[in-house]
Image (cartoon, helix red, strand yellow):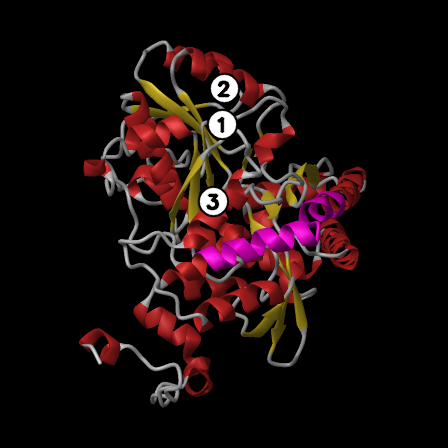
Amino acid sequence: MTTAESASPSPSSPPAAPGDFDLGALLADRGAERYELHSKYLNPQLPRMLHTIGFDKVYERAEGAHFFDAEGHDHLDMLAGFGVMGLGRHHPVVRKALHDVLDLSLADLTRFDCQPLPGLLAEKLLAHSPHLDRVFFGNSGTEAVETALKFARYATGRPRVLYCEHAFHGLTTGSLSVNGESGFRDGFAPLLPDTAVPLGDLDALARELRKGDVAALIVEPIQGKGVHEAPPGYLRAAQELLHRHKALLIADEVQTGLGRTGDFYAYQHEEGVEPDLVCVAKALSGGYVPVGATLGRDWIFKKVYSSMDRVLVHSASFGSNAQAMAAGLAVLSVMENEQVVAHARAVGERLKGRLAALTEKYELLADVRGRGLMIGIEFGRPTSLKLRSRWAMLQAARKGLFAQMVVVPLLQRHRILTQVSGDHLEVIKLIPPLVVTDQDVDRFVEAFTDVMDDAHTGGGLMWDFGRTLIKQAVAHR
């Protein structure tokens, strides 16, 4: 027997004996320390914030669009892990795919071979964007954006990328440079020499392009912060302007992609839009294995990877790993077989329509907007004197407190998890798992109506909580 043969495990060899590590036992023993451990070793402000607003819950398990606490009470998830849980939690097809890929014991990440799973997933993704040709797989949405920024600069030979005011594209240094919110950027300079333009302002875009140094415009077809959609015709016109000036269009579909807005990609709502680079992540993971993907035109990839000397000029240590690729393939299979995109469109239209009808009833409810299952609920200054004075009191302390006043009773009274759409915004963003049902919509609308009824009485527990938020806001100025 050769040395290589002797080193290979025999198919008939008994399985290795289990080690001393028992995850279930560890969680049973130490799980109750979750908030203390986080306070001591991780971000100390997160548990502090959760305790302050009463979000310090203990969830024991999850399934689909629901969490369950230790008492077995279900909580409706209208947040989907910031959009990661597109198929909800623990979809059986994705779970099975991950069990299968582990059981296969693949020779993963050898770095010097070509495994089939990345190619198969790229093929599936590109089928939804037939004008694009190649994919780079990384590990997150911000890494997908970083890839697009690098590729756009290299392919065009230009240094500057334009982005839209109030945009969010990630928090690593490159993606932070195209982040339209100063609160995330402050203290991390110097950043890359990129420039903000207003979403929808073609004149501002044209002025910047005339300077001749713009590589690309990166844009969310629907901005996550505030849930603002690009105006009709903007993406097509921007694309034409960019191409006229030899610049590229980058669509950031990290949150809006994979069915979220009722089409596979949000840019597809506008006819004739064909971005040069598209960034996806979040829901592609199935909620299990972090993954990001940058889709692009053939000529861009060939320019970046122009010779064998440049074969690793842009790479990721964990990119294209078998677990992430298996999860992505399973997600796309489920989306096709269960008609998830059509479901998101239909359920989203019903939810948005029912909420929009409430704007006539509640003076504090200013607007309901969005597409598919990406919906923004905006609150605004009321007309009646009593409510107006209370609104002014909240605004004087900190803008965004009223929206937080709505989010808290939705969780505490009705066991529904939502989020304020951004700092200093009076907007709640709904991005539930794409598998939410009509019954879930009924539950949310009934709960939201109850909370808004309370808010418009001008008294009760909601305004008492408002006073607590005011004290917190003033204390931390």
Q: Which residue is mark 1?
A: 275
Disc 1 to disc 2: CB gap under 8 Å: yes
Range of residues picked out in magenta: 325-347
Q: In 3D space, how far apart are the residues under numbered discs 1 and 2 (Cα atoms)?
A: 7 Å
What amino acid is found at the position of numbered circle 3 in the picture? Ala
Classify mark 3: residues with Cα within 10 Å, few (<14), some (14-19) or many (20+): many
Q: In 3D space, how far apart are the residues under numbered discs 3 and 2 (Cα atoms)?
A: 24 Å
**Closer to the camera, 322 or 397?**
322
Q: Which residue is mark 3?
A: 122
| Residue 453 in the figure: left or right of residue 228 | right
**Closer to the camera, 257 or 403?**
257
Q: Which structural element holds mark 1?
A: loop
Picture quadrant where residue 245 is located: top left
What amino acid is found at the position of numbered circle 1 in the picture? Pro
Q: Which structural element holds mark 3?
A: helix
**Residue for point 61% across, 57% down:** 87
